[in-house]
Amino acid sequence: MHLRTHDYLYNNRSKLLLILVLLGISLLTTGCIAKSGSNAPIDWAAEMHYTQSIKSQEPPRLYSPEGAVPTTGRELIRSKEEYASLKNPVSETEENAVVGAELYRINCSMCHGSLAQGDGRVGEYLKLYGYIAPPNLTEQATVDKTDGELADILANGINVMPKFRQLLTEDERWLIINHVRNLQGK
Ligand code: HEC
């Protein structure tokens, strides 16, 4: 009698276990399909990315009207002429010279070379793949440009030369221009 009760309990326990395992598996598998938009009758597996607030940020997005320009933010959109006549607002202190040199080293030297002779490592690859080589910035063509014209080039880039408008602040770019002038021996 004692033994039989034990057997009975034992058999039932393994059945219960089997039922629990099956239930677990079915929950897991329905969990995969029971999302919004599926045919599952109840949306019990709702997730953040199915909500309207997330959906509204997904494409297609509305673009700003054509011709609209930002009126706030760090930097104005300038014409070529406005750039050309800009004056460098950054003073040439020793401290500024150190910062300008470091900014040049980090952002420009890989292409234009550490002394701006147009001999940076990346320049070799640009040539290898058929692009224009980074020019020697100590040559007359660049010496003759106004600070403002250089500011235009740094802000907006030319061809493979990247635009630094969003990478560096205006002051940082002026510091670099001063450093280029130093390398030109000016
Ligand atoms: C990815 C390489 C690359 C980097 C980085 C780069 N440049 Fe250039 N740069 C070029 C190339 C290439 C040109 C020539 C573009 C052309 O005329 O098509 C150029 C042109 C210029 C010119 C115009 C020279 C002239 O007189 O016409 C200036 C000035 C200049 N770069 C300065 C800089 C400065 C300063 C930095 C760092 C803030 C910099 N560049 C970063 C590749 C680079």
Image: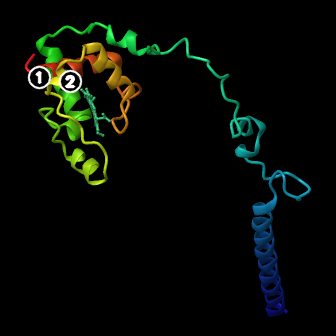
**Left or right of residue 168, residue 72 in this image:** right
User: x and y percent of residue 105 in the render?
Assistant: 19, 33
Label 1 sits on residue: 184
Label 2 sits on residue: 142
- In the rendered image, the quadrant that contains the N terminus is bottom right
**Left or right of residue 101, residue 7 in this image:** right
- In the rendered image, the quadrant that contains the C terminus is top left
Depth check: give the residue in front, 130 or 15: 130
User: x and y percent of residue 41 in the render?
Assistant: 92, 56
| Residue at x 15% of width, y 10% of height | 92
Q: Determine the image quadrant of residue 102.
A: top left
Depth check: give the residue in front, 139 or 15: 139
Three-letter code for the amino acid on which mark 1 is drawn: Gln
Instruction: Note whether 58 is above or below 181 in the view shown.
Output: below
Establish whether ligand 1 lies closer than 8 Å to the Cβ of label 2: yes
Establish whether ligand 1 lies closer than 8 Å to the Cβ of label 1: no
User: x and y percent of residue 17 in the render?
Assistant: 77, 77
Three-letter code for the amino acid on which mark 2 is drawn: Thr
Q: Nearer the viewer, mark 2 or mark 1?
A: 2
Q: Secondary structure at mark 2?
A: helix
**Left or right of residue 95, residue 159 in this image:** right
